[in-house]
Image (cartoon, grey):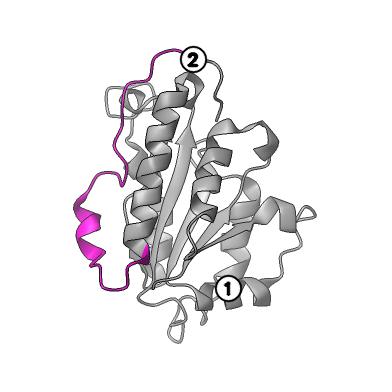
Amino acid sequence: MRKILILFAHPRFEHSVVNRALLNAAEANPAVTVHDLYELYPDYHINIAHEQQLLCEHDVIIWHHPFYWYSCPPLLKQWIDLVLEYNWAYGPQGQALAGKYIFNLITTGGPREVYHAGGRNRFTVNQLLAPFDQTATLCRMHYLPPFAVQGTHRLTPELLKLHVARLSELLQFLAGEHNDLLPLKRLEQLGDKHDEPVNQSAHE
């Protein structure tokens, strides 16, 4: 069984119906370790050795975060800056993460249709996540397409359940040690997008 580490970063998690539902689904899988960075490091003093040990113990890494200003919350950025050290994660002797799989699990308030060349945000989610892709590549990891739950401000309970079910299925597949994960790189996103009727009960 592959071991999966979710690096969760949400500074306002208590207000997030969507992310709580996604995390509840993840925690139900015995292969998954949920690691809440804001709960563990409210002072931003990251234990680098501990974080590196966690990475070594897992096969699949997931950066789970809301899509803040086309990127991640500041604590996750600091985690990347500090934990992925030269000659440990990258550089001539940086082999610690080589061959592991990694991707972004994100939530966006805007729907998928505003993320394209002619849309309000001008770029696709995948294009905006290019710095994460390059970070993974530099660390000799396999970067997979994102799992994105979009249009969260208008997400109905029924569609939230659908996204949760698809995440559960994905995690189960990722955990299967004999499943070939590289073909997933051909997908645009690891989860499908659906149009969401207006419902203000669920928030990013």
What residue is drawn where x is 58% and y is 32%?
17
- Residue 145 x %, y %: 32, 51
Residue 151 shows in the view: no
Residue that extends furthest to the top in the rendered view of this protein? 198
- Magenta stretch secondary structure, dominant: loop
Crowding at dot 1, Cα within 10 Å, few <14 / some 14-19 / many 20+, comes out as some
The kind of secondary structure element at disc 2 is loop
Residue 90 shows in the view: yes
Judge by depth and name the residue closer to the eye, 32 or 44: 32
Q: Give whichever of discs 1 and 2 has the lower sequence position.
A: 1
- Residue 156 x %, y %: 45, 21
Judge by depth and name the residue closer to the eye, 23 or 186: 23
- Quadrant where the N terminus sits is bottom left
- Quadrant where the C terminus sits is top right
- Residue 97 x %, y %: 44, 76
- Residue 63 x %, y %: 50, 54
Q: Is residue 122 magenta?
A: no
Q: Relative to 45, say whether 12 is above or below.
A: above
Residue under pointer 2: 199
Q: Quadrant of residue 143?
A: bottom left
Mark 2 residue type: Asn
What residue is drawn where x is 56% and y is 19%?
201
The kind of secondary structure element at disc 1 is helix
Judge by depth and name the residue closer to the eye, 60 or 118: 60
Residue that extends furthest to the right in the rendered view of this protein? 43
Q: Given this view, does label 1 or label 2 mark the residue nearer the observer? A: 2
- The region drawn magenta spans 175-199
Q: Relative to 181, say whether 59 is above or below.
A: below
Q: Which mark is residue 54?
A: 1
